[in-house]
Amino acid sequence: MQFDLERLGVHESVDAVFPAAELVDHLTDLDGTVDVIRDDEIAACDAVVTLEHRDEFLECDWVHSIQSGVDRFPFDALEAADVILTNSTGIHGRSVGETVAGYLLSFSRRLHDLAANQQANRWEQPAWDEGFTLTGKTVCVIGTGTLGRGVADVLGPLGLRVIGVRRSGDPVSGFEAVYPNDELHEAIRDAEFVVATVPLTDETHTSSTPRRSTRCARTPTSSTSLAVQSPTSPR
Amino acid sequence: MQFDLERLGVHESVDAVFPAAELVDHLTDLDGTVDVIRDDEIAACDAVVTLEHRDEFLECDWVHSIQSGVDRFPFDALEAADVILTNSTGIHGRSVGETVAGYLLSFSRRLHDLAANQQANRWEQPAWDEGFTLTGKTVCVIGTGTLGRGVADVLGPLGLRVIGVRRSGDPVSGFEAVYPNDELHEAIRDAEFVVATVPLTDETHTSSTPRRSTRCARTPTSSTSLAVQSPTSPR
């Protein structure tokens, strides 16, 4: 599939994640016009870069989602209208891997408690036997795509035993063992940590619910608190 | 030097760090009596395990400090009284290394801000360009003893370039470069992070003051905030 790119619009919905104008600045080498667009300018574009979906995109040749997840786009309608949909999968492996490592270390070294104490002007230390080291602990990563591999690439060298869960159960570099989806319970049984790096689909949206935590052999509450609870969640 | 160990006392000052009775439980295999002691029982002991110093220890044969730091003990008086002083250096490399890694990742992934937001019920995200990844960043570790090497052993595999500062400037495994003390300014010049892992001595107690941060080439405030500011410090 080929088309002439005369005008590329960076849709203003991108501003929710980063300044749309910054991306325009990075694309000045392209032939054709590149600018930030509002909804009423979509019709004039061959291609758009966007966070949100608009029905007007069905008239474009190419829609690029700035996120890895594309669950907000109507696949069937785009396909019927012959519109290419691309996403930014592949760019977040390292940053997600380091973020997950930061969560695990915050948890094992009780840094989240220290930060909370600091906020409350409390001079308290965690109990002497509360903290622990990650070496030799087991983490089960559900999903072995870019994000899951990024997590494994950071956690393995930290001394954790990394096992994975993927549909096929086929081996993946960086994972000591990989289980197929239908052996999820076996996979998380010996894990101190469970990390979910799966896209949101009909198949996955109920697979990581807290009730699974009862399947973990050790410290179930602790094991899954990182997987199911974001540190930015309002309490 | 040799002596008969008839009674080992675990001094109650240990309770400030962990339950003294727990240690007694771990030492039941020893010949002789092992129990938790108060000050008035020191005289009956050949050896003591302790956090704090007491002048009565000068009558013992052996004093073991549960900490790596022994700056609270009077070296000259102990030596004159022929008392052996030992410490627990060597046991904290991994836990300190992982704690430092947790600080760096909290900082780079802004997890400390997320924890603070959670405490204040604020639904906010860091600015789009605030977070960064550690790969390729440089950390300067001042002091290459057990703790410094523990830090290097964790941060190196995370993808950081680890350089060190030690008196001799001799190479140390796990450090890409090592500078002697008198080249400290050169050592920290290109570092995004500075980690101080030196014992408290007359020589070191002014070496890591905040004013050194002005010697860092990049983001000086950020670089040294972890080194000079504990997350548990009252604000």
Image (cartoon, coloured by chain):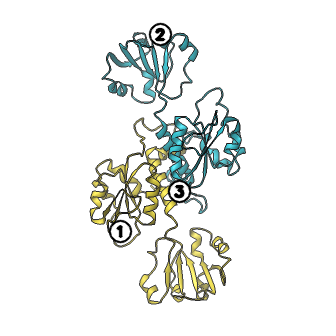
Chain colours: A cyan, B yellow
Mark 3: secondary structure: loop
Q: Where is residue B146 shown, x and y percent of the image? A: 45, 66
Kindly identify which residue carries mark 1.
B204
- Residue A59's disc is 2
Amino acid type shown at disc 3? Arg
Q: Amino acid at mark 1?
A: Thr
Point out the tag, 3 or 2, that comes first from the N-terminus. Answer: 2
Amino acid found under the numbered disc labelled 2: Glu
Q: Label 1 lies in what chain? A: B
Q: Identify the subunit bearing mark 2.
A: A
Q: Residue at x 56, y 68 (%)?
A: B17
| Residue ID at (45%, 30%) | A17
- Image quadrant where residue B207 sits: bottom left
Q: Residue at x 40, y 70 (%)?
A: B200
| Residue B228 visible in image | no
Same subunit: marks 3 and 2 = yes
Where residue A16 appears, as percent x and y from the top left, is: 45, 28
Q: Position of residue B141 (x, y in %)?
A: 38, 59
Give coordinates of residue B93: x percent, y percent.
49, 63
Discs 1 and 2 share one subunit:
no
* Element carrying mark 2: helix
